[in-house]
Image (cartoon, coloured by chain):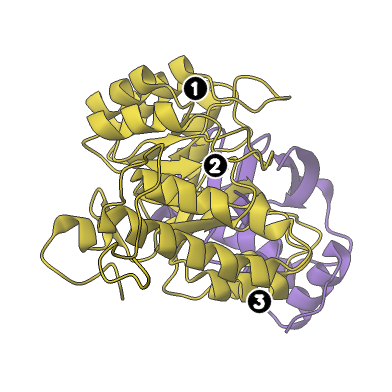
Chain colours: A purple, B yellow
Amino acid sequence: MTIHRTSNQVQTDSMATGTPPSDRETRSPAADANQSMDVRINGEPRSIPAGLTISDLLTHLDVRSSRVAVEKNRTIVPKTAHDKTPVEPGDTIEIVSFIGGG
Amino acid sequence: MPFDSGTNPNERALRVGAHTINSRLIVGTGKYKDFRTMRDAMEASGADMVTVAVRRIDLSAQGDENLLNWLPSNMTLLPNTAACFTVDEAVRTARLAREASMGDLVKLEVIGDDQTLFPDNQLTLQAAEILLKEGFTVLPYCTDDPIVCRQLQDIGCHAVMPLAAPIGSGLGIRNPYNLRIILEQATVPVIVDAGVGTASDAAVAMELGCDAVLMNTAIAGADDPVRMARAMRLAVEAGREAYLSGRIPMKLYATASSPIEGRIGV
């Protein structure tokens, strides 16, 4: 059972365990601004490393369930295309899953 | 398995499109105080189909505390489009649900009013048409209006799910006569969705001949949800058995159960 973690801890953990993408590991702490980009994820503005695919983004956000659906600019990105689809500056991303409902 | 044997189609498991549902009690997963209670209630209900809602994931709280980890793996997911007020929202939500669930089932809800949560039947028909073209198995939530139910059935919906009373109201089967008309003309399963408050309501729906009952609040909101889930399972089974038994007609006057002949002192 994984305990509840904040997003800051998540980033620290995934870097410590050496998960991809590789560009994150090679980046110095003083990474310059053009190595990150601004996107909107689930309605919130967010700055994320540049060059991520949808798969990378899910890893970056510590989304581990396979039962999620991702929209990029209102178009669904099928699971089979997650590792081929880049996240680009200004993208609006929605990541949804299931919760309790009637 | 009382519903899975026999050659009479009435006795078999419920079929919705290409899907087979063994339990005629379909339950929602919302409003439980914790996942453990929800899981225990699911088990007590005997349900093998559950409704779920589609929402943005909480990016600050990822981990194993995920609804799906608490559902048995053989449970069929029926994602809903709850809280959608437009055709566009409902269709978009259904498409996301299909991508996430890897299944084609959708409980289509297009809500017309946020106080009564009554469905907008016109928009529901429009959304259903789009989803049916895209290959979804569509179970629409609608009012207990025989005309709307027939229209939904005619465009190809795989079931109709008339409300018995407003969602979460617990008012019970408010219009059994409409349900009877809906049932008379139905060529697809009729599933009462919403309004059930206690076990007798579920039994009444099944005695009328409904194919299944879908409920959430009646179980999740009870003081003891696990016990109520069991009560609902028994009520749905009892109601179904009573329906299949062919009840006696109602009469105004008495008919003696004991014979007149052989009485003493006559």
**Disc 3 on helix, strand or loop?**
loop
Taking the image as shown, residue B191 lies to the left or right of residue A33, namely: left
Contact? badges 1 and 3 (CB < 8 Å)? no
Picture disc at residue A71: 2
Per the model, the C-alpha gap separating discs 1 and 3 is 41 Å
Which of B137/B246 is in front?
B246
Q: Amino acid at mark 1?
A: Val
The image shows residue B196 at horizontal and vertical percentages of: 59, 46
Subunit under mark 3: A
Residue drawn 50% across and 33% down? B92
Subunit under mark 1: B
Query: Of the residues tagged 3 and 2, which is closer to the observer?
Result: 2
Residue position for label 3? A19
Dot 1, how many residues are within 10 Å of its Cα: few (below 14), some (14-19), or many (20+)? many
Which of B164/B35 is in front?
B164
Residue B152 shows in this picture: yes
Which of A12/B105 is in front?
B105
How many labels were placed on the picture?
A: 3
The image shows residue B109 at horizontal and vertical percentages of: 52, 33
Taking the image as shown, residue B151 lies to the left or right of residue B201, namely: left
Per the model, the C-alpha gap separating discs 3 and 2 is 23 Å
Among the 4 quarters of the image, the one containing residue A25: bottom right
Contact? badges 1 and 2 (CB < 8 Å)? no
Where's the C terminus of chain B, which quadrant?
A: bottom left
Dot 3, how many residues are within 10 Å of its Cα: few (below 14), some (14-19), or many (20+)? some
Residue position for label 1? B87
